[in-house]
Each structure stands twice: as C-alpha cells, then as structure tokens.
Amino acid sequence: MLRAGDALRFTPDEIEDFRKLGLDFDGARTEDDIDQALARWADTLNDERPDLLEKIAAAMAKARGIPLRARLTRIR
C-alpha cells in the first residue's frame, strides 16, 4: 500500500490478495473507502458465516490481548 497524504494506492498483487479473502479494495482511495469495504465484508460474513466471523474476532482479540465480551444467545 502506498500513501500520499490522505490518498492510498494498492499494488495489483495486494488487490488480488485481498480479493482472495473476499475484500474488494479496487476503488479504495482513502482510509474511509477501506473502512466501508471492511464493513461490507464483515456484514456479509456475519450474514453468511457468523461462526467464521466469531473465530476471526476471537483471533484478533487474542493477538492484541483484548478480552471479548460474552456472546449473547437467544433462548426460545
């Protein structure tokens, strides 16, 4: 990733690596664009594979040493 002030640029290899993860940063030019792309990806992942999103969140929290909040479950 290359930065010039607030503008961001990705190399073609970086764009391809992100696409393999399901992230589309092709039109991203600012950090806000990246935030929006990540939010769309997380929303889609939450809809399709909430278990995988939970594992990703747990791994990220563990790497930073941050405890995750207890997950709420619905009882019927």
Image (cartoon, rainbow, N blue to C red):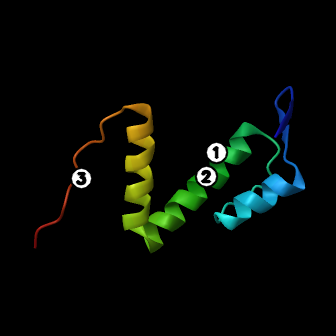
- The image quadrant where one finds the N terminus is top right
> How far separated are the C-alphas under marks 3 and 2?
22 Å
Specify the farthest residue to the front: 63
Q: In percent of the image, x 45 and y 70: which residue is there? A: 47
Q: Where does label 3 land, which residue?
A: 71
Residue at the top extreme, as displayed: 5
Query: Which numbered disc, 3 or 1, marks the residue closer to the eye?
Result: 3
- Locate residue 63: give its quadrant: top left
| Vertical position of residue 60 compared to residue 7: above or below | below
Mark 2, other Cα within 10 Å: few <14 / some 14–19 / many ≥20: some
Disc 1 designates what residue?
35
| Horizontal relation, residue 28 to residue 47: left or right | right
**Mark 1, other Cα within 10 Å: few <14 / some 14–19 / many ≥20:** few
- Give amino acid for label 1: Asp
The residue beneath circle 2 is 38
Task: Give yes or no for contact between labels 1 and 2 (Cβ–Cβ under 8 Å).
Answer: yes
Pointer 3 or 1: first along the chain: 1
Where residue 59 sits: x, y (%)?
42, 47
Sequence-first tag of 3 and 2: 2
Q: Residue furthest left?
A: 76
| Residue type (three-letter) at the residue carrying disc 3 | Arg
State the image coordinates of residue 76 (x, y, percent, origin top left): 10, 73
**What residue type is disc 2 on?**
Leu
Q: Are marks 3 and 1 in contact (CB under 8 Å)?
A: no
Spatial CA span between label 1 and label 2: 5 Å
Per the image, label 2 sits on a secondary structure element best described as helix
Q: Secondary structure at mark 1?
A: helix
The image position of residue 53, as x and y in percent, is: 43, 59
